[in-house]
Amino acid sequence: MKLFPELEKHYTKDQLSARDAQRLAEFIAWGPVVFQASRLMVKFGILDLIRDSKDGMTREELVEATGLSDYAVKSLLEASLCIGTVLVDTETDKFTISKTGWFLLNDPATRVNIDFNHDVNYEGWFHLEESLKEGRPVGLEHFGSWPTIYEGLSQLPPQVQKSWFGFDHFYSDSSFPEALKIIFDEHHVKSLYDVGGNTGKWALQCVGYDKDVQVTILDLPQQIGMMKENVKGKEGAERISGYGINLLDEKALFPKREGGLDAIWMSQFLDCFSMEQIVGILKRAKEAMTDDTRIYIMETLWDRQRFEPAAFCLTMTSLYFTALANGNSKMYNTADMEECIHQAGLEVEQIHDHLGQGHSILVVRK
């Protein structure tokens, strides 16, 4: 396994003392309540109040400011003290925010991840064991009876939808500006298939960036309906079209574009499938390609991350795919993705790293 330098430093040698390792083991054992207590410290505004105070706040001051009971505030503060999000002055009994607490409040990725895990994943995680054994998203069943979460996106409760799309868009949106330059400034794309285009957010970026490009979104029919509503009336919408397709259906072929096709875009898409399914999708994409067509695969490959927390988030996200999304996909590493590409009869021409929140773009040709 090849890892970027920062990851190799963390994942090839034990970093902790025995005492720290023991504490981390207990942290894992109490992980569910660590998460919920920390989430509520944010939701109830306790961390905000402590952060914004001049020199900290006492428990009594927090009770008055929040309207919560003394019992509730005391329980959360004591837990947070042990979790490490607040600190206490033993002389004044005032609580101040720690560095970890500051990141919990102010790091956009952390806030997105909290909402995603609470609203979308939390109940489903209970069925991770069954999902791993059965190869299907057993944790999805409390939302509905769909085989994958994608068929049910339009029917999920509004708050769940909000957190799901917030998570999905946060990670992709940060890389869009750099990705647009690669697609249009370096490669001068004029026709593009956006595979798994979802609500049309990337397509709108494309038609806004280049006044000549024609974009066709390939996605499930129900997603195409959501996309059309989302792009209606927006600038460049007349250059966005939809093509309903179940990409898990091996007989469902990519449409062939008259006059040829410049690009096939797959952003945070292939991680929604097993490696066998990825090979099948890429083979069908290949049939729609000319020698000049390029596939642009944008993924957060966990082994190519500059910073270890990003790799941590990505490997944890793999288990969301297991328990809730589809039961058989994950956040892949470079070797896995390259293996799929080669099995499909394609080759990697170039890799662009460190786009946005840790994305890479693999430029693929026949």
Image (cartoon, rainbow, N blue to C red):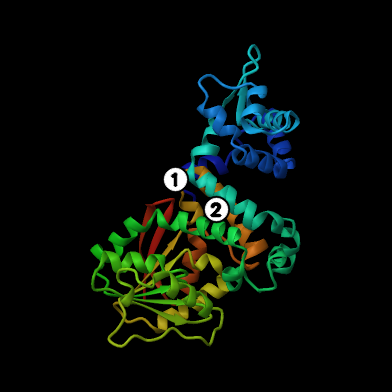
As drawn, the residue found furthest toward the top would be 91
Q: In the figure, 317 relative to 133: above or below?
A: above
Label of residue 314 in the image:
2
Local packing at callout 2 (Cα closer than 10 Å; few below 14, some 14-19, many 20+) is many
Instruction: Give left or right: position of 70 versus 194.
Output: right
Q: CA distance from mark 1 to mark 2?
A: 13 Å
Residue 78 percent across, percent down from the top left: 71, 28
First in sequence: mark 1 or mark 2? 1
Front-most of residues 328 and 258: 258
The amino acid on which the numbered mark 2 sits, given as a three-letter code, is: Leu
Quadrant of residue 243 within the rendered picture: bottom left
> Which residue corresponds to mark 1?
306
Labels 1, 2: front one: 2
Question: Can residue 21 be seen in this snapshot?
Answer: yes
Q: In the figure, 73 relative to 295: above or below?
A: above
Instruction: Give left or right: position of 294 versus 141.
Output: left
Question: Can residue 293 be seen in this snapshot?
Answer: no
The secondary structure type at the circle numbered 1 is loop
